[in-house]
Amino acid sequence: MKTRFGWRDLSIVLHYTGRILAGLSPLYLIPAFSSLVAREFAVTVDFMIGFGVMLTLGAGLAAFAPNGRRPDWVHGMTTAGVSWLLAMVVAALPYWLSHHYNSYLDAMFDVMSGLTTTGLVLLQDLDHVSIGINMWRHILTFVGGQGIIVLALALFTDSSGGGYGFYVGEGKDERLFPSVMHTAKSIWRISLLFLVIGTVAFWLAGISIGLTPIRAFLHGFWMYMATWSTGGFAPMSQNVLYYHSTVYQILTFIFFTLGSFNFALHSAVLRGNRRELLKNTETVSFTITMSLTLMVVIWSLVKLHVYPDLVALIRKGFFHLASAHTTTGFMTIYPQQFANEWGDSAIAAVIIAMMIGGSACSTAGGFKGLRMGILFKAVLQETRRLMRPSSLIMVQKYSYHGARVLSDQQVRNAALVVLMYVAIFAIAVVGGCVAGFPLLQSAFEAASVTGNVGLSIGVTTTTIPAGLKVLYIFNMWAGRLEFMAVLASMGFIGIFFTRSKI
Amino acid sequence: MVSRETGAAVIIHGVVVEILYTVALGLLGICICTIIAELVK
């Protein structure tokens, strides 16, 4: 049994990290080509520089020979965690070169916000950024939604061992197929299928509200990518409000709700298993928690007379709650309106919705409906156990692609992840308060970054202290990877440098 | 699974079912908004 990590382990991690980065480098060519077509030649150069740096770094790291050793579980997890951090550092280069950021830290914040599908923005003067930069923002959030490791696994042509460690390290533990690479390819096939459908739908909606066909296509393409990946980015600073369109709002609701569903659920339904939609623990959990939090939000908004009529109540109250619960972060109001108009109880309900989030193995964040369902079933099981004779063996079942028996290990795993979420949420709340923000606003923003949501109550601006930005970056990263890869990375680095035994 | 083995008709049917499901969720949300708004008024 391995008791410490040495240079050979490090070389395995660096080798596969390099391969992932090199695999991601062609993504730069998409915004480079877009900006070239749009005659934004300086922007094209920025992206070609980024492409060169990413490819060189990736190839350089991949040159570390793993000496024929196959990566094991720890290597896979550590690689996942480190890859996300290095991808953030390098992908920020075109942002920084665009001069739309006050610092490189702000640029890295926006990359992590995009990759983790959070959607908070520190970019300056969004309404006047180039087509290339807007393309990059939305490509990052789309790829991040599926997972950068999933993309790399889909591109790998050989069957690298330890693939499951990479995959789980990215917060996805549901295999659609026995082979991880086959699963990764299937996830991309599902996303690309909906990419075509969604882009056409948004394109037509854009034309119907008066955008020119080319502008409608670009906005449709970007909005779809931000919607499906539950990212919340939009090409204009007013976000969805910019379009003043009911059709746009309905489309975003449909596609961010779909994006928050488990890829295994999509897979089952697309194979003809429609009943899974109604029986699955995650969809049931989502419907219940969404309904309960919606009741509180609407009750609060009506009590405070925030919106004058039912249509406004639905288009603002319901839309933002759905945007929060699916961890999308689209907004049709300004951040300060949350703070000044919505009232404490509505804000508290939105915070809870943001923390719960969407489904496991989806593009969404939060601690996920599956864990919510498992913990609820565990409470139910314990209650029933108390009511029955002690000699009786209790079996609790839940529906998740067929009936499954709830095990103590599942309950323990779910409880641990929820506990970790709450812990880093609490740290971010304290961080916000230390930076001088009120408790409720700090809690709202902390839930937004931890759950990878992107709704803002006005805390996240370029003027907040650098320490708070770093804390938020950590929370986005840890929340997206669901801690295992983060713990593995920190453990690996700590053990490697201290030379201590496990 | 979206794969070469899955027929196009089954996939299209699945896509339509998923979209209709989200529409149903939206209608449920609208119903909740309407009922709560009426109760609180």
Image (spheres, coloured by chain):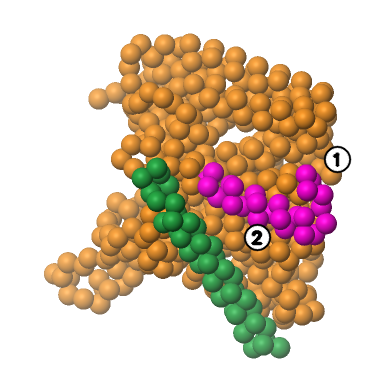
Chain colours: A orange, B green
> Is residue A214 inside the magenta stretch?
yes
Q: Nearer the viewer, residue A356 or A17?
A: A17
Lower position in the chain sequence, tag 1 or tag 2: 1
Judging from the image, mark 2 belongs to the subunit labelled A
Please name the amino acid that badge 2 sits on: Leu
Q: Nearer the viewer, residue A383 or A13?
A: A13
Query: According to the image, label 2 marks what residue?
Result: A251
> Is residue A114 inside the magenta stretch?
no
Percent from the top left, x then y, of residue A167?
A: 42, 37
Q: Nearer the viewer, residue A475 or A361?
A: A361
Can residue A329 be seen here? The reply is no
Percent from the top left, x then y, of residue A39?
A: 83, 28
Please name the amino acid that badge 1 sits on: His
Relative horizontal placement of residue A373, taking residue A27 as reference (left or right): left
Indicate whether A31 appears above or below A263.
above
Quadrant showing the N terminus of chain A: top left
Residue at x 73%, y 46% (from the top left corner): A217
Residue at x 25%, y 77% (from the top left corner): A387
Tell me which segment is drawn in magenta.
A191-215
Residue at x 81%, y 42% (from the top left corner): A126
Relative horizontal placement of residue A469, taking residue A378 as reference (left or right): right
What numbered label is drawn on residue A128? 1
Relative horizontal placement of residue A255, taking residue A7 as reference (left or right): right
Percent from the top left, x then y, of residue A398?
A: 32, 64
Quadrant showing the C terminus of chain A: top left
Can residue A196 be seen here? The reply is yes
Percent from the top left, x then y, of residue A243?
A: 79, 58
